[in-house]
Image (tube, grey):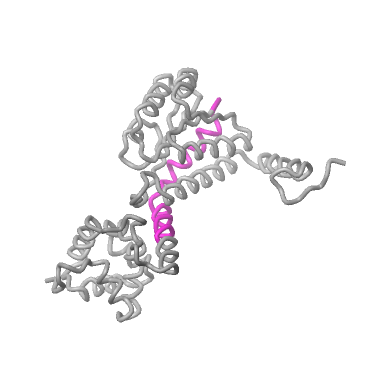
Amino acid sequence: MNSWTEEEGLQQKLRARQPTLPKAQQQVVAVLLADPATLVNQTVETIAAQAGVSMPSVVRTCRSFGYDSVREFMLALAQDLAVSPHHLHRNVSLSDEGPEVVRKIIQGAMSSLAGLQRRLDVAVLDQVAQRLVGASRVDAYSVGATSGFMAQELQARLFRLGIRAHAFTDPHQQLISASSLDTDGVAFVISHVGSMPFALEAARLARSRGATVVALTQPGTPLAHCADLCLEVSVPQDTTMRVGTEAYLAHLLVIEILMVRVAQTLGPDTLDNLKEFKRVLEQHGVDSSVYTGLY
């Protein structure tokens, strides 16, 4: 039975007692504090692996804070998160000093990206790569500033790999694009929120034309449900923005991984083309620290 007073939040207790705990338990607490919103739903095995300790160490940590089981501890942590006063960042308090802010934000991001590595479906990723390689045209649709940047990045990377691609942020252009895609075309829809009406309309129209709809979004969104292939990105919710920095980083990494798989699928000639692009840019002093000159 938990013996702590109700007035003090569980996260506060973890921070206060962390230095006095045995080393293994300190490691467990450090991982929990770095990304409580994600780890609250993880298994004991996952938490132990991230902390670099045994599963009994996780159990002992929970018991040292007055909880009979890991499940009871995680329920209390979830309740604490629900009433957390953090509005700057999910782990940062207004009174935190600079070094603590740096540590918490970076550790939180690292934990989110580690979660992405565990959850990313490589089989789906490779299906998307194959579909992009064989596409007659890839049109990327996006909603909002962050997703708009992602769509532009995807288009630029595909263009360098020799794949015909466009990026559209305007809903009218998205509908025109979707209506003109054929059965070999791909509509690549990027929206972390995944519920914007005009993006869904364009995705459904593209699918009705026989095109493959690929979504880069959170699992379970309306966009995920209407896509043929979904690259699911799940990160802790940002406390201030609908699409926070960790979602931004996760989307960029998924695009990076996908482009590498596309390049590998295309084969050795692609590497020769990329080398030639680099040589031309250096020759003209564009996008390069080296300028070889034209003559």
Q: Is residue 17 above or below residue 92?
A: below
Question: What residue appears at the point 33 percent right and 34 percent down from the top-left corner?
Answer: 195
Q: Nearer the viewer, residue 186 or 76?
A: 76
Quadrant location of the N terminus in the rendered image: bottom left
Residue 131 in magenta stretch: yes
Q: Is residue 91 left or right of residue 98?
A: left
Asked whether 144 falls inside the magenta stretch, the response is no
Q: Which residues are magenta?
A: 108-137
What is the tally of numbered marks visible in this picture?
A: 0
In which quarter of the view is residue 216 placed? top left
Q: Position of residue 184 (x, y in %)?
A: 51, 24
Q: Residue shown at 35%/49% (left/top)?
A: 240
Residue 34, percent from left and from top: 36, 64
Residue 138 in percent (x, y) is at 53, 29
Image quarter for residue 66? bottom left
Using the rendered view, name the quadrant where residue 189 is placed: top left
Q: Main secondary structure of the magenta part?
A: helix
**Residue at 32% from the left image edge and 70% from the top image edge:** 29
| Residue that sits furthest to the right in the current view | 295
Asked whether, in this view, residue 131 is left or right of residue 159, the answer is left
